[in-house]
Image (cartoon, rainbow, N blue to C red):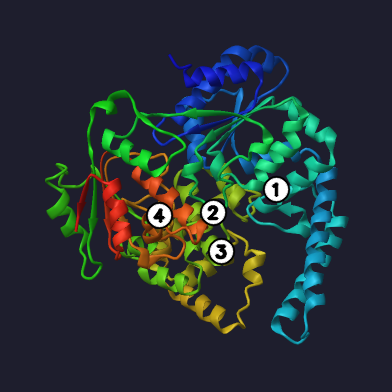
Amino acid sequence: MAFPIIEQIYESIDTKESFVLDAGAGSGKTWSLIESLKYIIDKNAESFNRNNQKIVCITYTNVAKNEIIERLENNELVMVSTIHDFLWSCISQFKKELKVKLIELIDEKITKVQSELDKAKNTTTKTYANNLEKKEKLESSKNELILTQNTTQYKNYFSYKNNIISHDEVIELSSNIFSSYPTIRKIVADSYPIIFVDEYQDTFPKIINILLDYLLPTNKILFGFYGDKMQKIYDTGIGEIPLTYNLKRITKPENYRCSVSVVNLLNKIRDDIKQIPSGTNKDIEGSCTFYQKPNTDFNLDSFIVHELKDKFNLEDDLHNLKVLYLTHKLIARENKYEELYNLVNASDKSDALTKKDKDRCPFIKFLYQIENVVLLYQENKIQSLLKEINFEINSFEDKKTLKSILDEFVAIRATKTVEEIFKLVIDKKLLQVSQKMNDFDLEDESNKTYYNGLMERPYKEIIQANKVADEQTPFSTKHGTKGAEFENVLVVIDDDAWRNYSFEKYFSGDTTNESIYNRTKNLFYVVCSRAKINLVILALSPLTGSSLQKIKELFTEVTN
C-alpha cells in the first residue's frame, strides 16, 4: 500500500525537512494543511509555549486566513497571517534599522528618477517636469524623515516624511533588512521555527526569495509550501518553487470533489498529476459538455432554460447552477455597471476593477477603499475601521461625529455621483488622497477625459463593481472561484472579449505565445475543476477545425 500523503508530511515535520505539497484541485489541500498544523500543535505545544515560539501560516487572502483560524479553533500557538502582516510583525520592532532602510529606499527612488532626467533629450516636456517635481518631493520627504522622531508606521497609504509606509514598502524593507542584518534573521528564526505558506503558487517571487534566500539558510526553520502550480491564476504569482532550493516534493493525487467525468477531463488537461476519483464522488459519473453558440443575439437565460434546466434537474431559482463568466464585460453587463467598465477599459485599466491587489488606477483603488470603510462600519469592526480612516478621534464627541458622518454616508452613497462621494470623503477627512492621485497628470488629454468620465459615473456602479471584485454576486470571474465548488457549473468563454487569454490558441495547441497558452491552460483547469457533478463549457467566439478536434478529444459531448 502506498505511504499515505499526510504521513509523508508528518515525516517531513518530524525530520525537519522543508517541503512542497502539490495538491491537485479537489484533493483536500486545506485539510492537509490543517491536519499538519494540528499534528505540530499536539507534538510541540509545550516546548513552543515554553520558548515563546509560534507556528506561522501565511495565507493569500483574509478569507482563507479566517477559515484556517476557525478550523484551528483560534489556537494561539498558530499565527495565521497575510504575508504583509507577517513581515511587518518581523521587522516592526527594529525601529532604527527600519528608518535607515527607508532612507536608503528613498535614495534608490531618487537615483532612479535622476536617471530618467539625465536620459531626457528635451527638458521642456511635461514628463521631464513631472520627474523633476517627483525628485524634489522625494528629497524633501527624505530630509523631513531624517529629522522626524516618529517611529515607522504601517498603513494603507505611504507618507515618507511622516515615517509612514504601505504594502509595497513592507516587502521591500523586509527584503533589505533580512539581507543586511543576520542578527534579525536569527531572531525571526528563533521566534518562528515552522512557517507554512498556503497557495504558494500565487505568492510574489520577491516574497519567496525573502523566505528561502534569507530565512531558509538559517537552518532553524521548517518550511512547508501548500498549493498547486496549475492553479496559478494571478500574473504576479511565482507559479512554481524553483528546484534549486532542493525542497522535498510531495504530490497529492486524490480528488474528493469532482465526478468521474470531470476528473477524466482534468487528467487530459494536465500531465504532471494523474488524479484519482476518491470518496463519495468516485461513484458519480457526471458529465462534461461543450457547446458552441454564436455571440450575436445570444441570450444566457434562454440557453439555460432550454438546454440545461431539464438535463441537470436545475431548480427554478437556479441555485444549484454556478455561472462563471471569464470575461469581465459580460459580468459588468449583468451587474449594471457596463458603462463604468467601458470607460475604464478604454483607458487600458480594466483590471483595476477586478484586481484589488493591484494599483492600476489610483482612483478606483481609492473608491474601493471607501467601500471597505463602509463594510467595516456595517460589520462593526471599529478597530479595523479606525486604522483604515484618516479621521482623528480624541474625544467622545469625535466618536459621535464620526458615527453621524458614516450613517449619512452609507445612506446616500447609492444616489450620488462618484465626484460627490469623492468630495464628501475628502471634506469629512475620512480618507487621505494618495500620492499617485495627486501625481495623476490631468493636463494629459486622455487622462483628463478618463478622470472626468469617472467622476460623472453614478457611484452605485462602484458599489456593484466592488461587489463583483469581492465575489458577492451570483456571477463570478475566475479569480474568486479557486477553492470553491458547485454542483453544476456553466463556464462562458469568449475570446473576443480579452487579450491575455486565447482558448482558440490553447485548444489548437498554438504555443507561439507561451505566456498566453499557459495562462489559458491554467485558467481552463481551474474553472473546470469547480464542478462537482456536471460541467458545461459554452464558447461564444468562433473556433477553428483544429480546436474543435481537440475539444472532441476532451469532452464526452460536443454540441453546436
Callout in the foreground (2, 4): 2
Q: How far apart are marks 2 and 4 (CA)?
A: 22 Å
> Cα distance, mark 2 to mark 1?
20 Å
Residue, disc 1: 170
Q: What element carries label 2?
A: loop
Q: Which of marks 1 and 4 is nearer the N terminus?
A: 1
Mark 3, other Cα within 10 Å: few <14 / some 14–19 / many ≥20: some
Kind of residue at badge 3: Arg
Marks 2, 1: nearer the viewer: 2
The amino acid beneath tag 2 is Asp
The residue under label 2 is 235
Which residue is at 60% across, 79% downward? 442
User: Which residue is painted at 23% across and 30% down in the image?
Assistant: 284
Q: Decide: marks 1, 3 in contact (CB < 8 A)?
A: no
Vertical arrangement, residue 84 with respect to residue 187, above or below: below
Q: Which amino acid does label 1 sit on?
A: Val
How many neighbours does mark 4 have within 10 angstroms: few (below 14), some (14-19), or many (20 or more)?
some
* Front-most of residues 288 and 196: 288
* N-terminal-most mark, 2 or 4: 2
User: Which residue position is annotated with label 4?
Assistant: 467
Do the residues bearing badges 2 and 4 touch, measured as CB atoms within 8 Å? no
Please, what is the three-letter code of the amino acid marked with disc 4? Lys
Residue 401 at x, y = what percent?
55, 55
What residue sits 42% from the left and 43% below the top?
A: 482
Residue for badge 3: 360
